[in-house]
Amino acid sequence: MSGFKTYLSFVKPYWKLVVITVLIGMIKFGIPLTLPLILKYVVDDLLLSSLPAEVKVQKLIYVMLFAFALFVIVRAPIEYLRQYFAQLTTSRILYDLRNRLYDHIQKLSIRYYHNHKTGEIISRMINDADNTKNIVETGMMNVWLDLFTLSIAMGFMFYMDVELTLVAIAVFPFYALSVKKLYSKLRAFSKSRSQALADMQAHLFERVNGISVIKSFTLEDVEKDNFDKKNLLFLQKALALTKWNALTNAIINTLTDIAPLLVLFYGGYQVIQGGITLGAFVAFFAYLDRLYSPLRRLVNSSTELTQASASLERVIELLNEPYDIVDSPAAKSVQEVKGKIDFEHVSFRYDNSADWVLNDIRLNIRPGETIALVGMSGGGKSSLISLIPRFYDIQQGRILLDDVDLKDISIKSLRSQIGMVLQDNILFSGSVRENILFGKPGASEKEIIHAARAANAHDFILNLPNGYDTEIGERGVKLSGGQKQRIAIARVFLKDPRILVLDEATSALDLESEHLIQEALEQLAKDRTTLIVAHRLSTITHADQIVLIEHGEIKEKGTHEELMKKEGAYARLFNVQNLNETVKTDSF
């Protein structure tokens, strides 16, 4: 019920449109209810009357002109308006719902995305959100219109013959019993099908993104079988829902067919006995269709609403997903920062049941300093830098920026002061210019070019087919690794942050690209507090502090010269790397 109340908050701004659509629908569905009355008049008052033939024809022409005017001239625009307003209302509500969902998922923490598949999130935003429109179109519009049609038809039928009407509605209790029994499982089947679809989409999303891996390992046949399993599971869930729907329709249609047979028998008997006129019997039989058509639609509406409620449940589950990282009530915005960062006895783990990733970290970084974090993979370097923009919150200790606890700084203003260049930077489909503008939306062309020059990217951009307007493809697939990295650096130049985070930004690149990027990064790091996660120690010997992290703890700390004099773990690691590089150079 709480989920339905949440959904009503999206409907509330459009309640006038809903009412207008229902009122127009009442006219649309009310017009066909006049046809049996016209039929009764034609049979009893014209065809079976003793009026002269000329008079009958004249009156028949008048009746038909009225009928044509009502059903052709009046009903056509009414039908158009009803459809238009119904679609307008549901489309606007879906627009608002998807906007809210998108805004919501942007506020979810990195941890949430690590624990949920992208394809499933997309499925809830697209498929499940789209299915919820039946709650409005069917539940708030069509159901009331069908009840209106049903009530008017029954009113006319009771007016014409009470006994015959009671015969016509004798199967109503069986309808109610069928709906109660059959629809109890429909919700579970609908939700199960939606989950299977989401799983298949999540699998497909991952495989499309990793198609180069599949091809390089010639796993096409294996992956075809894997997708077949997901597709088969969805087929099974879909067929289970289809079977239940088919069973429901079979029972409902059978009950619907019983009513006309009962009316045909009893009504025919009444005509023979003189209880009702032939015209009244024909009109009554015509109203029978007006009675059971909306009733059948109401039953189908139950199916649609059950499936829509299952989708709504999945949408609300996503909307109710709590935010791990939020501003504290006392959080304030920061406009300018010096870049002083202090880690005070910081301990961190990704999950309360997991082991500590960082343990009792104590580190003081002065404004404008360059700090290099080194050590073996898995030691906690990347985890440490992810705490500065509050991608995760720590469990113990404090992190201070300019002597202010990070939790007392608004997340948006904190992250606006931080620029990040990663090993695998994400570029988006679109032009080079659009990707650089991520650093500062609305920047001028002069600022964009200045940032690109600073990143050693301007020259290669001009050599692209359309320069800054060149489309780079999804994740920048049309660019080399070095080109992507320089565009990523350009957007950080454009952002102009006070704090710079470099996470193995030059690894896995050729020597020429590495030289250009290293040059750009040195320019970028000037007068900024810079944290560098580096695998190649020869690139960070200039750092003001080098911090060796192993198993989540700081083992050594100092300048390159100081650590080399200690002849500890850092010196051994540096010497091993130098020896390996010398061997590689000599081999060439």
Image (cartoon, rainbow, N blue to C red):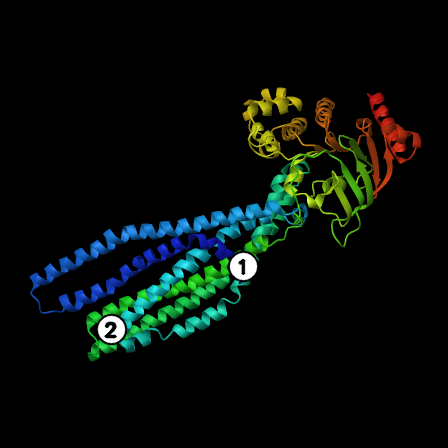
Q: How many marks?
A: 2
Instruction: Give neighbour class at mark 1: few <14, some 14-19, many 20+ (Cα, 10 Å).
Output: some
- Estimate the spatial distance between the alpha carbons at disc 1 and disc 2, rounded to whole Å: 45 Å
Residue that mark 2 sits on: 160
Q: Amino acid at mark 1?
A: Gly
In the rendered image, the vertical position of residue 415 relative to residue 289, given as above or below: above
Q: Position of residue 509 (x, y in %)?
A: 72, 28
Residue that mark 1 sits on: 3
Which quadrant of the figure contains the C terminus? top right
Q: Determine whether, in the image, residue 252 is placed left or right of residue 264.
A: right
Residue at 51 percent of width and 63 percent of height: 186
Q: Determine whether, in the image, residue 318 is placed left or right of residue 363.
A: left
Residue at 82 percent of width and 42 percent of height: 362
| Residue 136 visible to an observer of this rendering | yes
Residue at 77 percent of width and 45 percent of height: 398
Q: Quadrant of residue 384?
A: top right
N-terminal label among 1 and 2: 1
Q: Position of residue 43 (x, y in %)?
A: 17, 67
Q: Amino acid at mark 2?
A: Met
Q: Position of residue 323 (x, y in %)?
A: 64, 50
In the rendered image, the vertical position of residue 331 relative to residue 444, given as above or below: below
| Residue 233 visible to an observer of this rendering | no
> Of residues 180 and 1, which is closer to you in this image?
1
In the rendered image, the vertical position of residue 227 relative to residue 182, given as above or below: above
Secondary structure under tag 1 reads helix
Secondary structure under tag 2 reads helix
Callout 1 touching callout 2 (CB < 8 Å): no
Q: Quadrant of residue 235?
A: bottom right
Q: Position of residue 32 (x, y in %)?
A: 27, 60
Q: Determine whether, in the image, residue 504 is placed left or right of residue 122.
A: right
